[in-house]
Amino acid sequence: MSEESRLREEIALFAKSLFDRGLTPGSSGNISARMSDGTVLVTPTGSSMGFLDPARISHLSADMVHLGGDLPTKEIPLHSAFYDTRKPTGAVVHLHSTHSVALSMLTDTDPDDVLPPLTPYSIMKLGKVKLLPFFLPGDPAMGDAVRGLAGQRSAVLLANHGPVVAAKDLSAAVFAMEELEETAKLAILTRGLPARGLVQSQIDALVARFDKT
């Protein structure tokens, strides 16, 4: 099986898993993955993550020109911003997952670090997650906001919209996204309760060992 065929199948498989678990409803969410030749496969506009046809997944050039397949998601500016500013990026996942969106709407969420340090795994896989302002869906300004971070964050949370995660490959991006959503869920479940999070020395040790900021 060619690299392209394999990656098309993997995108559809991961997308269905996310959809089946209710992590992105309806026709929301999108996934992209970069191939070794620099071109990018991305889920089509208006498509449901639960019912993707691998053969119809969009194929874009390295500079995001449509080469084949269905027309790509309108959120291409988000994806291209991560590919351009974080060179190790091999995949980007954007969802409308419920708990992450809810966390983005709470007025006391820290905009520089939306996830409280509740478990080691969110720090290991994500580092600090930046809250970005609200943008209209598909607005190129979303990509500009990501570019403004100069590659310093692997994940952002769009206010009233949803999370975006970049990682070295597709499985790493999906797993980090799942960690983001689960940590957001924990943050909401424990809000107002005397929860015991990680102390600063534990956080510092994780940051040092896993090279996260």
Image (cartoon, rainbow, N blue to C red):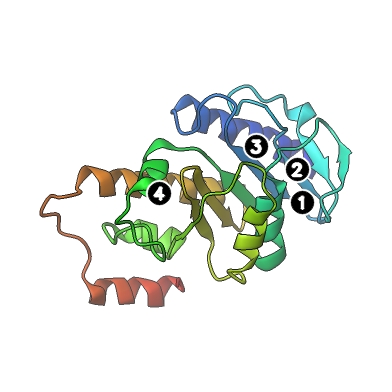
Say which of marks 4 and 2 sits in front: 4
Q: Earlier in the sequence, mark 1 or mark 2?
A: 1
Badge 2, how many Cα within 10 Å: few under 14, some, many 20+?
many
What residue does disc 1 label? Answer: 35
Q: Position of residue 207 (x, y in %)?
A: 39, 73
The residues bearing labels 4 and 2 have C-alpha atoms spaced at a distance of 28 Å
Taking the view exactly as shown, the residue that stands out farthest to the left is 194
Alpha carbon of mark 4 to alpha carbon of mark 1: how far? 32 Å
| Residue designated by label 2 | 41
First in residue order: circle 4 vs circle 1: 1
Find residue 133 and report its horizontal and vertical position in percent.
51, 55
- Report if the CB atoms under discs 4 and 1 are less than 8 Å apart: no
Residue 11 - label: 3
Amino acid at pointer 2: Leu
- Rate crowding at label 3 as few (under 14), some (14 to 19) or many (20 or more) other CA atoms within 10 Å: many
* Amino acid at dot 4: Ser
Residue furthest right in the image: 67
Left or right? Give the position of 24 relative to 203: right
**Mark 4 or 2 closer to N-term?**
2
Residue 4 horizontal side relative to residue 186, left or right = right
Q: Are marks 2 and 3 in contact (CB under 8 Å)?
A: yes
Residue at 15%, 59% in the rendered image: 196
